[in-house]
Image (cartoon, helix red, strand yellow):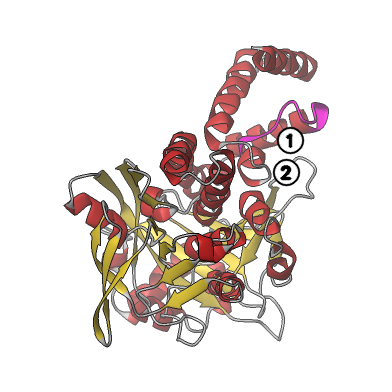
Amino acid sequence: MSAERDEIAVVGAGLAGCLLACYLARRGYPVALYERRPDPRTGRVERGRSINLALSERGLDALRRIGLAEQVMADALPMRGRMIHPVAGEPQFQSYSGSGDRAINSISRGALNNALLNAAAALPGVRLAFDHRLVGLDPTSGEMTFETPQGKVAATASVVLGADGAGSAVRGQLLGYGVLTESLDFLDYGYKELTIPPLGGDFALDPSALHIWPRGTSMMIALPNPDRSFTCTLFWPTHGTASFASLGSPAAIERHFAAHYPDLIPLAPNLVDDYQHNPVGVLGTVRCAPWQVDGKVALLGDAAHAIVPFYGQGANCAMEDVVELDRCLDECDDDWSAALPLYQRRRQDNAEAIARMALANFVEMRDKVASPVFQTRKRVEHALERALPGRYVSQYELVSFSTTPYAQVRRRVRRQYAVVGAVAAGGLALLVGAVGAAIGRGRRG
């Protein structure tokens, strides 16, 4: 079957690119998967660039469709809620779901990438090309030019799909041709990774939670790893006092953490070395339009819509892009000129919705989670979820534990919040009745 079809080029062998290669090969397409870096299965991970993924339902749904979910989940660590670490006092656990049994899953980005890469490589018709950096693309002909260790290489494909991340070379080429516009909205925040090693051969913190140290204008999070360590990520301002730029000497670093993250000190023996030598990454939102050109070139995942990581949905959203494109190809009988515009129409509003929710969740995580008002609201939300199963569902549950389109999530949650706010002064019975009635009306409308 594959011999009857022209080769499809996928640029970028990250999560979205490898998953896309699997889906396309399953459809019978020959696929050339190009990656600018060496094969990650044999290379060394760059220090401080291992950000764990919070794999949730959207990503799992994409993996189930190609039979990889069980394999990937074998090394995942379920996190059923947030563990909030105050400056002083005991940590407090906040469940993600009203039932307390739903979880997002901490997983190594590298391990997931390698599993997807191995799956793609094992499929007939998939050709891997590492150390290929895209430096030229003609969107009208599909002609590409790559820089490799052996010199420049030319290639052609009937369709070129850019899954090459926030700094996408494919998007850059389309921008250069004047067929695309983009906007980059960077935060005045960066991120830096630290490590909490195992303690006495076991986890130093509860591995069933995502740990958060909310500090108002900044925060730190920690996710568990299968080797019983934790990967911590600082999200701090890049300039000003109490920022990455303001701490230089070992003594200043130790003083700052002793004052703001005192419980971390005894758990992170390499704190100063990690802080001084791990890089500071940038955080921002990428928007562009259009996502596809003439049914011949298209962008997926971060290449089309990079978002900040504060909802744990970047990878999940990118993987959902692949599922939607596959669905569009089904509906359009593999007519790419029809499928790619349809894919964009269906996904662009959803990508914008999760981009906005991720930015809002940053404020929630660094500031609101420690607030008694916020904690009370969450308890009320969980009570409503238990009282109205399936009718009142929190934003977090809809985003993380369903495949409800992101834009639909935002609309539904606004309707729920409006009702809760309108009757908040009444008793719980009145609240339950009003919310149930309003949601029922919304469904009929």
Q: Is residue 415 left or right of residue 138?
A: right
Residue identified by numbered label 2: 97
Label 1: how many residues lie within 10 Å, few (<14), some (14-19) or many (20+)?
many
Q: Are marks 1 and 2 in contact (CB under 8 Å)?
A: yes
Q: Which image quarter holds the C terminus?
A: top right
Going from the N terminus, do you reach mark 1 or mark 2 first? 2
Which corner quadrant of the image does residue 302 belong to?
A: bottom left
Question: Whole-Å distance between the Cαs marked 1 and 2?
Answer: 7 Å
In front: 194, or 320? 320
The range drawn in magenta is: 386-395
Q: Is residue 133 left or right of residue 265?
A: left
**Local SS, label 2:** loop
Q: Is residue 264 left or right of residue 100?
A: left
> What residue is rendered at 46% in x and 76% in y?
128
Amino acid type, residue under disc 1 in the picture? His
Whether residue 312 appears in magenta in the rendering, the answer is no
Q: Is residue 314 visible?
A: yes
Which corner quadrant of the image does residue 37 belong to?
A: bottom left
> What residue is rendered at 58% in x and 49% in y?
323
Label 2: how many residues lie within 10 Å, few (<14), some (14-19) or many (20+)?
many
> What residue is rendered at 43% in x and 73% in y?
49
Q: Which disc is residue 96 wearing? A: none
In front: 373, or 430? 430
Q: Which disc is residue 382 wearing? A: 1
Q: Main secondary structure of the magenta part?
A: loop
Q: Furthest-front residue in view?
A: 4
Whether residue 393 appears in magenta in the rendering, the answer is yes
Q: Is residue 21 visible?
A: no
Q: Which image quarter holds the N terminus?
A: bottom right
In front: 317, or 329? 329
